[in-house]
Image (cartoon, rainbow, N blue to C red):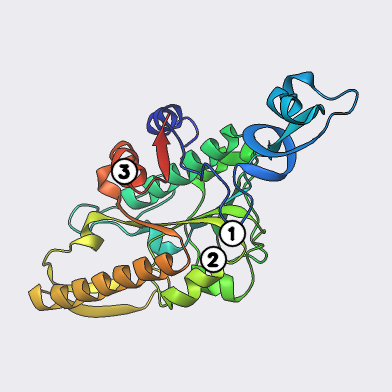
Amino acid sequence: MRFDPEVQQAVARYQLGLPRMPVSGRSGELLGRGTGSSLEFQEHRQYHPGDDIRHLDWAAYARSDALMVRLYREEISPRMEILLDASCSMMSSDPTRDSLAPTAQNAPIKATVARQLATMLTLLGGNLGGRPALIPITDGTPLEPLPLESLDRLDSFPFVGKRTLREALDERAIRLKRQTVRVVISDFLFPHDPDAMMRQLASDASVLWVLQILNAWEARPTALGGRKLLDMETQEEANLQIVEKTIAEYSARLLALQQELARACRRVNATFAILIAERGLPDLCANELCSTEILRPT
């Protein structure tokens, strides 16, 4: 995905919408706690031989007859963690279109766009001088990040996990670091308590972005009549009439879930976006991701 044309175009056109100034009570953004050469003034101190004379404050000298230098906040590269749901449900496809069994090489649009998003965000984080940690949520413990130099492995990374994001958090399989820009990419179509999970994800993070990615049929299903459904994670089968009544019940549950996720994110000052994979990466970047200020045009 590193050399995917849409990913390359997005990396050239956008930057991460990180806070421009430190958030009260949090750190790990673009500015650190030490002194450096950024543009944000921190404090004065008396001039010492060897100090950069470009930082002399002549106005302060005129007032006090003492040479003072201006100190500035240190600029640092943000730490970034991208949690990518790699469970089987991310390989779900539109039953009215896709007839082939999904594989890493024949990935449905939902899995493809999830990979594009993860790659794009990792590269944008790398552009800021950091080393973003892209962590696929698999069945392993502990979960290991894909190094930036091994990002190409994501192209064929198998989405075959049985463990959900909630289970990985509860089992402490993810080594979450403090003061990070944390991004979560998942369909969230698994049993969970949105409030509890968002509190876990937001804990010790400086920024939390939550991206729910669905395919178009998951977002707005159409009637199919009688079908045998297979749970992609448990492999359990069920016969179901996919008719207007069933669709209405499903749609009501999905809407309730999305509203709960949005409320839970607001409570922890996180940003929540719903992404429909068929819209394509360029459209999602220009609209949902820019409107939520996860991305900014360069």
Indicate the quadrant where residue 125 lies: top right
Evaluate whether residue 204 shows in this view: yes
Tell me the residue that label 1 is attached to: 205
Front tag of 1 and 3: 1
Which of the 4 image quarters holds residue 217?
bottom left
Neighbour class for label 1 at 10 Å: few (<14), some, many (≥20)? Answer: many
- Disc 1, SS: strand
Q: Could you tell which of marks 1 and 3 lies nearer the N-terminus?
A: 1
Q: 10 Å neighbourhood of mark 3: few (<14), some, or many (≥20)?
A: many
Badge 3 is on which residue? 284
Nearer the N terminus, badge 2 or badge 3? 2
Residue identifier under label 2: 201
Residue 106 visible here? no
Amino acid type for the residue under numbered disc 2: Leu
Point out residue 164 in the picture as x, y percentages from the top left corner: 49, 70
| Mark toward the viewer: 1 or 2 | 1
| Residue at x-position 37% and y-position 46% | 113
Question: Is 242 rendered above or below residue 220?
Answer: below
Specify the amino acid type for callout 1.
Ala
Residue 83 appears at what percent x and percent y? 53, 56
**Label 1 close to label 2 by CB (< 8 Å):** yes
Classify residue 119 as left or right of residue 61. left
Cα distance between the residues tagged 2 and 3: 23 Å
Please name the residue shown 60% across and 42% down the image: 30
- Total number of numbered labels? 3
Q: CA gap, disc 1 to disc 2?
A: 8 Å
Where is residue 159 drawn, in percent x and y? 47, 57
Most foreground residue, 20 or 16 = 20
What residue appears at the point 26 percent right and 71 percent down from the top-left corner? 254
Left or right: 154, with 240 as reference point: right
